[in-house]
Image: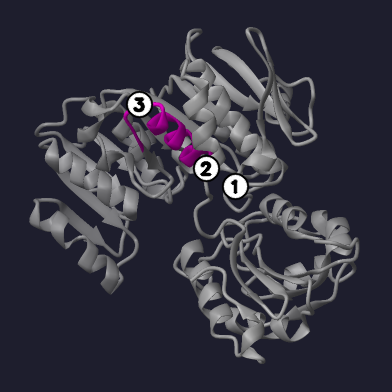
Amino acid sequence: MNDLKNKNVLVIGLGVSGRSACALLLRRGARVFAVDSNDSPELVQLVKPLKAGGARITLGKMEAPDVDLALAVLSPGVPKNCALVRQLAEEKQVPVIGELELGFRQSVCLHIAITGTNGKTTTTEMIESVLTQSGRQTVAAGNIGLPICDVVEQSKDLDFLTIEASSFQLESIHHFRPSVGVLTNLTPDHLDRYESMSEYIRAKARMFMNQQAFDWAIVQSEAYAQMRSLGILVNSKVITFSANNRRADLFLERGLIISQLPDWSGPLLSMDQCCVSGPHNAENLMAALAVSRVLRLPLKPVIAALKNYEPAPHRCEPIAEICGVRYINDSKATNLDATAQAIRSVGPMSTLEPNIWLIAGGKDKGFEYHDVGPLLSQRVKGAFLLGETREKIRAAWSLFTPCTLVNSLADAVARAADSARPGDVVLLSPACASFDMFRDYQHRGDEFRRSVLMLQVLPAEKQTIVKN
């Protein structure tokens, strides 16, 4: 349903994506109804412009309006099995789609989509940079922070819309079909929403379900094997990449990214020339290189873009070095694999002894935290744990590293600073969501930065602030 004029459409959930969907529907002439179980003063203010534009909004309860609905649009934060969605889909036979699907149907350019457990945002930004450097018009949207519905009108002037897609967004697609789909990796995440890892993998794999034989799937080889083990087939052309598997089409060997694709074989890029580091970032670079290959972009500007790419804040972001101790903000690490990657990346510096003081904890996502125990015993001197998961994490980690419970992030920073010695690293890498104590991971990272920069350091001449 691309013609929305005078159609009754219900938007379920009024987070950023839901409000964006409402705004697009109003611009398209739909009669918009919207509901959200939240009725906070902040949300009341945020929806005022939508009400002024004609949307009929109900806060504090999730009930369908008493009208014949042509369509319902679901915000990604609202699960598909909630009572209202089931009522609409099963009893009233109302089509239910997500904001991602709505934006896709209303846009008029080709789409490149990136999903995966970790590295989605970094890879999306790399691909956006590669396209821009090569003279192609694109905008990065989706789960990266800019809803697709906000940029629909721009799409007529774009060569590609570069989309970061979460598993939540992919749950509610119907016709969404990227010309190029990228899957960065598959590790346990959101197990508070999915009953099993296989269910989570199937949600991610929906990225490729509508692709045709002439489309492209660029997939980490380990993730591709996981999909195939579940019987998930990909109909498009496949390119694999891996930092660990030399049989992949693109692989890492002694710091070099090497291709063994026909007519594109040999070393492509040295990690020593890049601003990012670590095997996980090597895979992000491989994905961007593979996208450039299938789009037939000239290699020189692609390599220049990737060499100069610097990661966004909250991703192993150096904050300060104080009396020989480095403070690193990895607040974006909201699952165990991301935290493990950060630990491997930041230490040890010049010794095989543990040198990391880890700050972790937050809202539980259903992980088995003991899985990273052996890595902690090798790299982590001690952990400071906060949030609703702190007791659960201590039970899992205390056999591997000393664990201290703290009541706030500021307390964790102060205690880590007291414990650290020159050559050590204080690393915020929570392995948890942030919503128990913070608005989002950015808020958590900003609070970490503020706490670090407020540390009283003596003598002052030994304090070296490397980022404000």
**Residue 245 found in image quarter:** top right
Q: Give the number of the mark in front: 1 or 3.
A: 1
Amino acid tagged 3: Arg
Amino acid tagged 1: Cys
Looking at marks 1 and 3 on the same chain, the residue that comes earlier in the sequence is marked by 3
Image position of 160 with respect to 81: above or below: above
**Mark on residue 456?**
none
Q: Nearer the viewer, residue 430 or 414?
A: 414
Seen at 25% across and 30% down, the residue is 155
Looking at marks 3 and 2 on the same chain, the residue that comes earlier in the sequence is marked by 3
Q: Which residue is mark 3?
A: 136
Amino acid tagged 2: Asn
Seen at 68% across and 70% down, the residue is 326
Q: Which residue is mark 1?
A: 275
Q: Nearer the viewer, residue 309 or 400?
A: 309
**Residue 306, horizontal then vertical, whole percent:** 54, 36
- The magenta region covers 121-139
Residue 105 lies in the magenta-colored region: no
Is label 1 in contact with label 2 (beta carbons under 8 Å)? yes
Q: CA distance from mark 3 to mark 2?
A: 18 Å
**Residue 259, horizontal then vertical, whole percent:** 68, 20
| Figure quadrant of the N terminus | top left
Secondary element at tag 3: loop
Q: Give the number of the mark in front: 3 or 2.
A: 2
Q: CA distance from mark 1 to mark 3?
A: 23 Å
Q: Which residue is mark 2?
A: 308
